[in-house]
Image (spheres, helix red, strand yellow):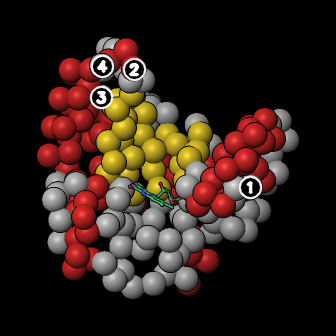
Amino acid sequence: MLPDISGVDVNMGCPKSFSVSGGMGSALMKTPEKAYEIMRALVEKFGDKISVSCKIRVLRTDQETFRYIKLMQKAGVHWISIHPRTAAEETRVPARWYTIKKLLETGEISIPVLGSGDLFSPRDVHKYLSYTSAHGCILARGAIHNPGIFKLKQAMLDLATPLISAKDDQSADEDDWKESIVEPVMDEEQN
Ligand SMILES: Cc1cc2nc3c(=O)[nH]c(=O)nc-3n(C[C@H](O)[C@H](O)[C@H](O)COP(=O)(O)O)c2cc1C
């Protein structure tokens, strides 16, 4: 089967009860040691043949999130994608783009980082990449609403002239986000 598979990407982001009730999806982020062992085993078994990666959400604090990401890096994952909202928040708050930016500014991450969250147009992607310095991004609702968005790949990737600088960005400010925070309502389900 391996010739037909280009990579294994472990879903550590799904907040739905059908996943978390079985210890899968975002529940894995509550058991970092288990997640580490899973990723380590996948890397050891397949890492020299295909890409091994994981998709995560953020935890309650940047400190916890960064510790988790560094653990995945230590496990040997080739790259990681991050949705900067907690599992409990789903899409009820703006994605914290600044968390991806802060993560990369630590200088402690050597694997490619893909970000996501609230990307609905090539302009959004352009802003995201220039603001965060992420190596790439993934789209969910933007692609569902407009599957043709990927035809505009070149417009998305043309970073020759950043549309914004980290200084004057108005969409991803930490204080703005704090004002719009909502209580996580799905925590009980995940425990
Ligand atoms: C229908 C749907 C299903 C999703 N399922 C998952 C999932 O299983 N695991 C996960 O990490 N994220 C999942 N997500 C979240 C997306 O992968 C993405 O990180 C998030 O929606 C942010 O992107 P967006 O703001 O562009 O929608 C899902 C999103 C949608 C819309």
Residue 114 is situated, as x and y percent measured from the top left of the image, at 52, 43
- The residue wearing badge 2 is 4
- The residue wearing badge 1 is 121
Question: Callout 2, which amino acid?
Answer: Asp
C-alpha separation, residue under disc 1 versus residue under disc 3: 33 Å
- Residue appearing at x 76%, y 50% in the figure: 122
Residue 168 is situated, as x and y percent measured from the top left of the image, at 77, 62
- The residue wearing badge 4 is 1
In the image shown, does 179 or 25 lie closer to the viewer? 25
Q: Can residue 3 be seen in this snapshot? A: yes
Q: Can residue 101 be seen in this snapshot? A: no
Callout 3: CB less than 8 Å from ligand 1: no
Question: Callout 3, which amino acid?
Answer: Gly
C-alpha separation, residue under disc 1 versus residue under disc 2: 31 Å
Q: Dot 1: within a 10 Å radius of its alpha carbon, few (fewer than 14), some, or many (20 or more) residues?
A: some
C-alpha separation, residue under disc 2 versus residue under disc 3: 22 Å
Q: Nearer the viewer, mark 1 or mark 4?
A: 4
Q: Which of marks 3 and 4 is in front?
A: 4
N-terminal of the two: label 2 or label 3? 2
N-terminal of the two: label 1 or label 2? 2
- Label 2 with label 3: CB-CB less than 8 Å: no
- The residue wearing badge 3 is 76
Q: Label 4, secondary structure: give it.
A: loop
- Label 1 with label 3: CB-CB less than 8 Å: no
Question: Callout 1, which amino acid?
Answer: Ser
Callout 4: CB less than 8 Å from ligand 1: no
Residue 27 is situated, as x and y percent measured from the top left of the image, at 23, 60
- Label 4 with label 2: CB-CB less than 8 Å: yes
C-alpha separation, residue under disc 4 versus residue under disc 2: 6 Å
**Which quadrant would the N terminus be assigned to in this image?**
top left
N-terminal of the two: label 1 or label 4? 4
Question: Callout 4, which amino acid?
Answer: Met
